[in-house]
Amino acid sequence: MITSLIGRTFLQAYNEKYKTSYSSKQFFEEVYFELFFNHNKYLMSGGNSSFENPKISWDKMQKGIMPYESEERRRERLVKFIEKAENTMGILDMGIAPGYPAAEITAATSGLVSDLIIEYTEDDIYYSWFGSGLGIGVAGGYSFLINDPEILLKTFEGWSIYRKYLNDKTLENIRGNQINTWNGQWLTFRLGKNFREEFVFRDLEQEGFFKIDDKLIEVNTVKWTNLFFSLSRNYPTQILNSYIYSFGQTNKTIGFIPVYLSSGKKLIDVWRKLYGSDSTFDSHAFQSLFGLEIKRACELGSIGLLALRPQNLRKYFHNDKSLNFKKEEEIIIYKSFKIWLIAMLSKNKEEITDYTQEIANLLLRYRAGDSKTTRKNLIDKDLLAASSKKAFLDALAVIVKDINDSDMEAIKTLRNEVHLMTNEEFTYFNTLLKFDYNYTERN
């Protein structure tokens, strides 16, 4: 199963990097168990295995009563697990190997059920735990498993940091069992521009790692686009074939989805062309403006430019609705819309141009030649709200009658460009033109 594949890739990469020769069992006993389960708080739930979490009353913990298990009891759990692993033959289930089907295949928690008889080894059991611990959680309740040695090792680096905070007596309210959520935040930070080797808890808090109140500190789930842009900065040409899933009360499998990191580079290139400095683009707040909900993004079959479509942009298609540009936040939203639309229009082109801004200026010159509202209404209601190329070209035919001679050639070029566009390209083009026109009008 996929968790075992990920675990195998990870351990091989770990041994190569750190010049060790751990077997899967040795690594489980000496490294994995020590980090994940040999403490008062676990890094992740033990599920239905012998590591099933001890029952701890939060109310009692708040009163200073800590009914944790002893280390001796935790060692007993490890011995019981090892014995079961050594005596499990053939078919595995999730009671011993995370990510495998439940023993009862009708159970709601079962996943990756197959009618093929596939035999597994003892190594696969240990690998499955490593792989499960390397899931990268994102908002929406799903996680990514990425079979890339370098990314797996960088994810692993965060395990000890999470353990350090769980053991920190000054952070006694921090929640355990969040390793996949932690991995999402950690990898986004580790590959982001704000990462530095010497960081403290306060730095991670400012990065948005945690939700903190009087009773609880828990790790926030990161938005998938924040993770995506961090990955794309480090691996701008890579395609990551990612397994996307959710393990919980009900297991959900989306499957293998290719993630095109070049799409992030495309958006960054457009931003630099238009606005120069990366500082705004690098902020988590700006990056979170992009992206469909993760499940909807996966329904497209791949995660790339189309999946990065900014939130709420669709409601501006084929109508005269636009932003007001009265607040700074609306200008930021406009910029996210603009660079995505330009990226979509130029995705198969080397040159990135601000063509719609030139047309917006032309339309404003045309409108200025009318003291009434006739030309304004023609632009707003007929041209920019056109739901088809034909409606747009019909409005353009009216405009061309009164256009300045100096703008005539540009109008003819526009007509030819629109005529050759696909319907999808026209939607993007006219929406961008509408935003540029209204932004220029108000500013």
Image (cartoon, grey):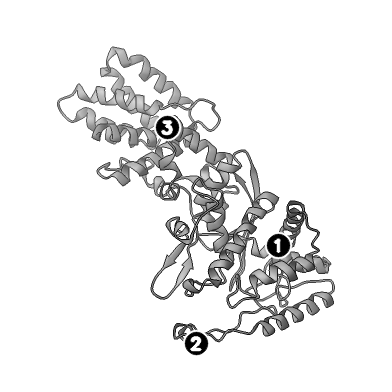
In the image: residue 380, left or right of residue 295: left
User: Image point 53% across, 33% down: which residue?
Assistant: 347
Depth order, front residue of 202/185: 202
In the image: residue 381, left or right of residue 3: left
Query: Residue 377: where, in percent of width, then height?
Result: 23, 33
How many angstroms separate mark 2 from mark 1 (CA)? Answer: 37 Å
Circle 1 SS class: helix
Q: Which mark is residue 3?
A: 1
Query: Residue 122: where, in percent of width, then height?
Result: 82, 69
Q: Hey, which quadrant is residue 324 in on the image? A: top left
Label 3 sits on what residue type? Gly
- Mark yes or no: residue 115 visible: no
Circle 2 SS class: loop
N-terminal of the two: label 2 or label 1? 1
Q: Which mark is residue 65?
A: 2
User: Image point 35% across, 25% down: which residue?
Assistant: 359
Q: Which residue is mark 3?
A: 276
User: Image point 40% across, 30% down: which residue?
Assistant: 390
Q: Residues within 10 Å of mark 2 (few under 14, many from 20)?
A: few
Camera-near label (2 vs 1) is 2
Rendered view: 170 above or below 145: below
